[in-house]
Amino acid sequence: MDVSEQLKSLGFTTNEAKAYLALLECQPATAYEIAKKAGLPTSKIYETVARLVNRAVFQATEDETGTQQYYALNASDLMKSIRNKIIADTEQLLPELQKVPSSNQNNLIWPLLDDSQVQIKTLENIHQAKTSILVSLWPEELAWSERALLDAETRGVKIALVHFGEPTRKIGATYHHPVEETLYNEKGGRGLTIVVDGSQVVIANFRAGGEVDGAWSRNPSFVTVAEDYIKHDVYITKVTRFLQSEVAARFGENYNKLRDVFNSEA
């Protein structure tokens, strides 16, 4: 998702997103200059600029000739403003929504249809964690979740992290999964599984071709299966860490025989 699309997801129209990005690069600027930079028709720019001024995203000034020019709120302050508004709105709305009678939906499994939805739900879960996080992931997913996991660890949340690939730093109890290449080839991509407080889970697959499919749920059975999956990977990682030469000798390179679940003799 490009920056313009991300701004639209935060409530900007297409024209407002283009105008804001354009002004960031050429401020101060007149409405005409913003339109030219943004590739917008001049017939639309004045109403677009007016809306952004009303929302305190743009500020209007006059130069020494009396020409009206505009400045854009810097990116950091804009994000803080949007974040604070969303927090205030949700905190005000939640008590009202909780008054509405609703049936229990804990057994539902909610689909996550793209990378953005997976990231948002995963980070949301991590921020909600109070006691424990079990997580299995690859370097690409650790790159955007590491900060949130470190924050959770600082809050006293216990973390067990199974990392496919050599981890660059330790978060909680970190385990390097020994057969990441074999798994990648078997599954045709990467996987993410995270269980928070033993009560909710996010699972996602990132295919080699770029497709993403995932799910989030509080379904107890779904959570238990995911939790056991991560714990069993931890068990295997511990065994291979301390008995690496013996396991390799018995089950072969990349532990191929160990992964042959249909052969009880291997």
Image (cartoon, rainbow, N blue to C red):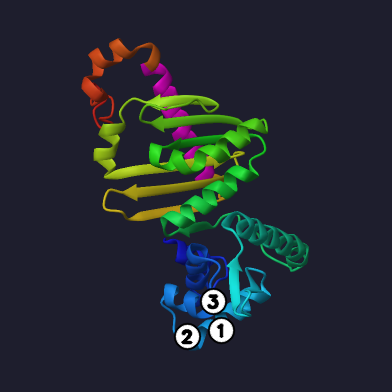
Q: As shown in the figure, which amino acid type bears the numbered disc 3?
A: Thr
Above or below, 201 against 244 in this view is below
Per the image, the residue denoted by label 1 is 46
Residue shown at 44%/73% (left/top)? 38
Prevailing SS of the magenta stretch: helix
Given the image, on which type of amino acid does mark 2 rest? Answer: Thr
Residue 157 drawn above or below residue 208: above
Q: Contact (CB < 8 A) between labels 2 and 1?
A: yes
Q: Residue furthest left?
A: 252
Which dot marks residue 42? 2
Quarter of the image that includes the C terminus: top left
Q: Which residues are magenta?
A: 222-240
Assign a secondary structure to mark 1.
helix
Q: Give the CA separation, mark 1 to mark 3.
A: 10 Å
In the drawing, what numbered circle is on residue 238?
Answer: none
Along the polypeptide, which appears first: circle 1 or circle 3? 3
Q: Is residue 227 magenta?
A: yes
Q: Quadrant of the N terminus?
A: bottom left
Q: What residue would you read off at disc 3?
A: 30
Does residue 166 sit above or below 213 in this rendering? above
Closest to the observer, 127 or 258: 127
In the rendered image, the vertical position of residue 37 relative to residue 163, given as above or below: below
Q: In terms of sequence position, does the residue under pointer 2 or pointer 3 come before the other?
A: 3
Q: Amino acid at mark 1?
A: Tyr
Q: Circle 3 — which element?
A: loop
How far apart are the alpha carbons under marks 2 and 1?
A: 7 Å
Q: Residue at x 67, y 38 (%)?
A: 130
Question: Along the horizontal axis of the image, is 169 left or right of 249?
Answer: right
For label 2, the SS is helix
| Left/right of residue 137 with respect to residue 210 in the rendered view | right
Q: CA distance from mark 2 to mark 3?
A: 11 Å
